[in-house]
Structure formats: C-alpha cells, structure tokens
Image: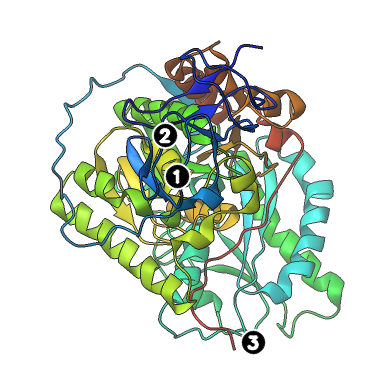
Amino acid sequence: MNPLTILMHERDNVAIVANAGGLPPGATLPSGLVLRDQVPQGHKVALTDLEANAPVLRYGIPIGYAIKPIAAGSWVHERLLKMPDARELDNLPISTLKPEPQAPLEGYTFEGFRNADGSVGTRNILAITQTVQCVAGVTDFAVQRIKAELLPRFPNVDDVVALEHGYGCGVAIDAPGAEIPIRTLRNISLNPNFGGEVMVVSLGCEKLQPERLLPPGSFAIVDERNVADVGASADTPLDVVCLQDDAHVGFMSMVESIMRQAEQHLERLNARLRETVPASELVVGVQCGGSDAFSGVTANPAVGFCTDLLVRAGASVMFSETTEVRDGIDQLTSRATTPEVAQAMIREMAWYDAYLQRGKVDRSANTTPGNKAGGLSNIVEKAMGSIVKSGSSPISGVLAPGEKLKQKGLIYAATPASDFICGTLQLAAGMNLHVFTTGRGTPYGLAECPVIKVATRTDLALRWHDLMDINAGRIADGDATIEDIGWEMFHLMLEVASGRKKTWAEHWKLHNALVLFNPAPVT
Ligand code: CA
C-alpha cells in the first residue's frame, strides 16, 4: 500500500490521510515522515512538530490551536485542538476582490417546461398545497387515488405531490419570524416544477387561512410579454378545497372534491411539452450533508468548479448553510459584487448569530459525531470545506430564508445547514435542480425536484452504487481531476434537467419531508 496524503494549501502543517482504512503507525510518507499513530482515513497527520498553542493550518488558515505539543507524524484529532473564535462581523473586507470576468459559456441547452412567468421547470408535477398539517392524511389518501386513477390518463405529468408540512395552526402566526414559514410555503407552491397550477387543501378553522398563505395576485403567473396568454391572472380566485365546508358529507366527499379539482390542473399540466431552453434557465441549489474530511477535498471543489461553469452559462446557483459558511464570512464579503450584497450577507449572518445565541449555542453546535469520525475536527474545518461549493465567481445576490429568487448568477440563500430545512428553503427560492454531496453517506431526496448526489470517496460510491450519481472520490484516487468531475456534473445536470436521466433518488422515490424553518414560537 502506498501511503497517500492530501495537502490543501502550501502553508498547511497538517495533511489528510487518503488511504482506505487509514494508515498504521510506522507508515512512511513520500516525504520520509514516519507516522507515530494509527491515522484513520480522512483524518489529519501533523507534518511538523507543533508547540502548544501553535496554529494548526488547513486550507491555509488556522482551523484550531494545539492544546499541547504535537509531534510530527501524530494523529491530529479534535481533542487536541482549541477552536478559534468566530470572526467578528465588523471591519470585514467589502467587495475587495474583483475577479476577471470569465468567458461566457454558450451553446448549452436542456429540454424544460417553460412557464408563463418565464421560469422553467425540469419536471412537470402537480403539487397540492396544504394550509395546515391537519389535512395531511386526507390529502395523502386523495393523492394515492389520483395517482392510481387519474395520473395514467395524463402521461406528460411526472407526479402528484402533496406539500405536507407541520405548520399552519398552534403557532404564533403574528410573531416576528413567522413570515419565514409562511412565505416559504407560498413560494414552494410557486416552484417552477409545478407549472403555476396552484391548488390548496384547507381545513377551515386553521390560523393560516388560504388567503393569508396565497393572497389575491400572489399566485397569478403573469407573463410580462403577453398577459392575455395566461390562464391565471390577478383576478383568478384561489382554488381551495375546504374540508369543513358544509357541502362535504362524509370523508369520501372530501376526497372526491380534491380529485375533481386535481383533474382540471392535470389536464392543463398535461398539455405542456418540453422545449429547448438555454442552460441559463437552471436554478441549482447546492448543499452538503453527512460531510467528512474528503467533502472539502473532492466533491465540494468539483461542485465549485461546476458552479463557475453554471454562472458562466448564465444560470442561477444558490449556496446556503449559514453555520457552515459563517467562519469564512470574510472570503464571501470580499467576493460580493456590490457593498449592498456584502451588507445583506452580514445582516443574515448577524441574524443567525442572534438566533443561535437565544438557544445559548453558537455555530459549533453544527458538527455531528459522524463529521468528527470522518475527520472534521470542528466547524471551522467543516466550513472551509463547505464554502468551496460556491466556486470562485462573484456573489451577486442574497436571499433571506424563504424568499423567492429573481436574478441570475451566484446567490447566497441564507438557510440553516439542516439538510431538509435547507432543501425546503431552496425549493421556495425556485430551485429546479439540486446537487448534494456526501462523505458519510445519506440517501436524501426530494419529491419536488431532482437531487444529484455526489460521493466524496470511492469506498462510499462503491458501497452505495445505486444511491450515488457521481463518484468524486476518483479525485482522491488520482483517477480524475476536479475539472473532470465538475464537467461530468455539468453534463449530468443537463441530462437530468431534460428528463432524459433520472437520479437514483428519483428512481427509488426517496423523498424526504419538507421541513419548514420556523424561528417563531408555537402555542
Ligand atoms: Ca446540509
């Protein structure tokens, strides 16, 4: 076995052991350094003698300080490191980096469903919005029947999905922060994959009344080019099935109401056809979960390379996960296209700092036992590996949680790092394609949008051969470059967006729940 280590930056005084199974004591690195300890795969080995309090450098920055002397060749694990304090949010570099504009990437297209408002869907799905959790069982029952009895008649429609969630009643609906779950639900209903066919199932007595969720005009898909062509206008009434309506006698009459309304939407959705659209119509959300030390070495840098390709093609790319980028805030504010964008980023980080403080924790609450077992000592190290998903393009916009995206380019969509909450908020922003990297392995998937999963290690890609769509572990094996995998991802995105390929999560119908971010009290 050839001992293999990965160095991320020339200044680093630790490197990552790449060999499957790790390296035993006595193993000799190509530099001549002999290991003193067993070092697991993905974990750090000290390249030089470190004194107590010496900075431990990875990605060229201190990810921690040695709490006692560490000899060269030792395993550097989280119990030997003191975590640096979070960077203050004042005196940050604001729009200081002016990267050379990269050449536009032209000629790439995919086959998508063009919506009246100009947005493009990658799937053609009937989504049934719910105002409150109380109606979830009835809606699910109706959806099963719609799929069995109606959907076969509408071959152009990919799926019928109930937008189930835990919100809607028993909540302080006017408290500060309550606008986040409400606008999230509203904007998910308007996701481009649903074709503007909004239908709502309501209970009747809930706090989140249909007209509060989707006020008149908010759900009309208005075509600025030709308003007359559009079915829904500002005067179109919201299509609501209210279960407590006096007209409903018995459970089956509720189910039949939902089915009757769904049929009208299915007819209109079924009339849509895919057409060739430029790659600039992609709205990609990038995320990582179940991260290990390879996330920041293989999969996330490949995503970053692909992010740059997408931005060059004129597409929208969102990166998120506030606690996982907080420690690199100075890298992000310096890449903001304008001071306003940098200030919006700082505003979102400050909001999140205060939110965590209310719970008497800080960003370090992010890391999981799996992260640590995978070699990530703390949130600083995890963040440096997470930020690389954003590539090197200028950051041109910021979204608060649950807001809808209205621009192209690289966007910081502020969300918690929780996989399901982040995915839910990226759906609300208008994501039509999702890329998800994982090192420890997660079977994550969404019913609303295709999810391309990228493994950070070959070992995982082989074990989970029917769950992982791309193996970025080949970068660590020396069999592919970051650029190779980035291009593979870009081409796969166009195939998946066109419906020519299904992701493994779609194939197996692995659908995680929508999980709303509700920072407001429940009652
Ligand atoms: Ca995540």
Q: Which mark is residue 69?
A: 1
Give SS at disc 2: loop
Question: Quick check: 460 left or right of 121?
Answer: right
Q: Position of residue 389 (x, y in %)?
A: 42, 36
For image coordinates 46% across by 22% down, the residue present is 486
* Marks 1 and 3 in Cβ contact (< 8 Å): no
Q: Is residue 401 above or below residue 342?
A: below
**Figure quadrant of the N terminus:** top right
Quarter holding residue 376: top right
* Marks 2 and 1 in Cβ contact (< 8 Å): yes
Tag 1: amino acid: Pro
Q: Position of residue 420 (x, y in %)?
A: 59, 55
For image coordinates 69% across by 44% down, the residue present is 159
Of labels 1 and 3, earlier in sequence is: 1
Look at mark 2 in the image and give the residue it sits on. Answer: 49
Quarter holding residue 452: top right
Classed neighbour count for the residue bearing mark 2: other residues with Cα under 10 Å, few (<14), some (14–19), many (≥20): some
For image coordinates 82% across by 62% down, the residue present is 141
Give SS at disc 1: loop
Question: Of tags 3 and 2, which is closer to the observer?
Answer: 2
Q: Position of residue 323 (x, y in %)?
A: 44, 56
Frontmost residue, 436 versus 317: 436
Of labels 2 and 1, earlier in sequence is: 2
